[in-house]
Image (cartoon, rainbow, N blue to C red):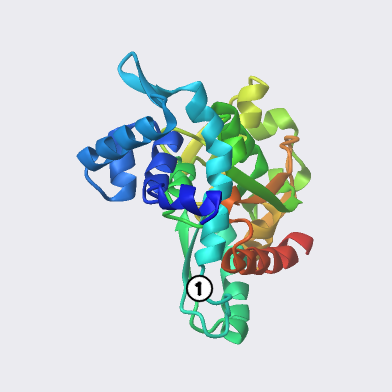
Amino acid sequence: MDDLERRLRATNLNLLPILRAVLKDPNLTRAAKTLNITQSGVSNSLRQLRAHFGDELLVREGRGLRLTEKAKQLIEPLEAALSALAQVMAAAEFDPATSTRQFRVATADYVMAMTAPEMAAQMSREAPRVTVQMLTARGRSAGDLRAGDIDMIIAPRQVIDALIYQAPALVRELALEPLGSEPFVCLAREDDDAFAAGLTAEAYLARPHASFHLDLGAHASLEHAYLIEHGATQFNRILTSDFNVLPLIAARSDCLVLAPRSLARLFASSLPLQIGPSPLPVPDLELTMVFETRRKAEPELAWLRDLVKRCVAAPLAS
């Protein structure tokens, strides 16, 4: 028996997922919920881990817990080890033609409208029994990804950058892959003569608007970020977390709407709308897919990433 075999036999590998959970979120109650075990089970495992490493790993700080330096040093090698172990223990190589796997992707509703029809068509040919559940992205989607509840987030790069700025530890855990970019355009009712004649930025801001706002805690909107950054204000008659509702509002009212170009074109083909350039230089929307770094080598996730890239490419390029 060599040294590696002796060390493996002496190690309780069942402790590793628990170690990962508490390193990602130093809260025993939430770790227990993520792992679907009791809090006392987490506490007992933590006691064994402390004995094994000769370190407290988590120490009390105020009303919460923080990682020790030793615990911080374990994060990257633990992720690498668990990723390698997952590949070793994986079932036969992923075959989309026979798989019945279900994937979960969190994104904006307009991305669903843009990609889901083409995705269904491609899957009918190459993965007839695979399911992709598309969920509306929310403020806690990054937490859902880290907990393994979803497989991927598709969101603007600017929103992801802001999230990472607030939680720098995510840099190590999340992999980002660009999908493409597109500009924002302005939508107005077909018979809006003032819009057709062209609006200055001041005239545009003086009009009523309908705009995207994710949820109570975060706007996740490049439009609102631009307004805040430049100290500008506009009256938002309707705020909604559904991008796809915005063109419907513009077609029935005097509200102006900023929307991604692909969405604007999709709805303008069937609604009484006109499209014009944005009177405000809002940055282009840079769509990015986000997934856990430790899963980057998984064949099934690689297939999903390729599928998403194929389905997003055409609408962004047109």
Residue 290 pos. (x, y %): 60, 50
State the residue in front, 56 or 176.
56
Judge whether 240 appears above or below 117 on screen: above
Horizontal relation, residue 305 to residue 15: left or right = right
Foreground residue, 180 or 93?
Answer: 93
Residue that protrudes farthest toward the top in the picture: 62
Residue at point 73% right, 64% down?
A: 313
Q: Which of 175 and 116 is in front in this view?
A: 175
List x then y, in percent, for residue 316: 74, 60
Q: Can residue 27 be seen in this view?
A: yes
Secondary structure, mark 1, is: loop
The residue that label 1 is drawn on is 91
x, y percent for residue 204: 67, 35
Task: Establish if 127 lies above or below 259.
Answer: below
Q: Where is residue 298 in the image (x, y as percent from the top left)?
A: 59, 63
Q: Residue at x 41, y 27 (%)?
A: 54
- For this view, does 85 lie left or right of residue 261? left
314, 177: nearer the viewer: 177
Q: In this view, does 189 lie to the left or right of 102?
A: right
Q: Quadrant of residue 149?
A: bottom left
- Residue 249: tell me if it is visible: no
* Amino acid carrying mark 1 in the image: Ala
Placement of 135 over or under 290, stated as above or below: below
The image quarter containing residue 173 is: top right
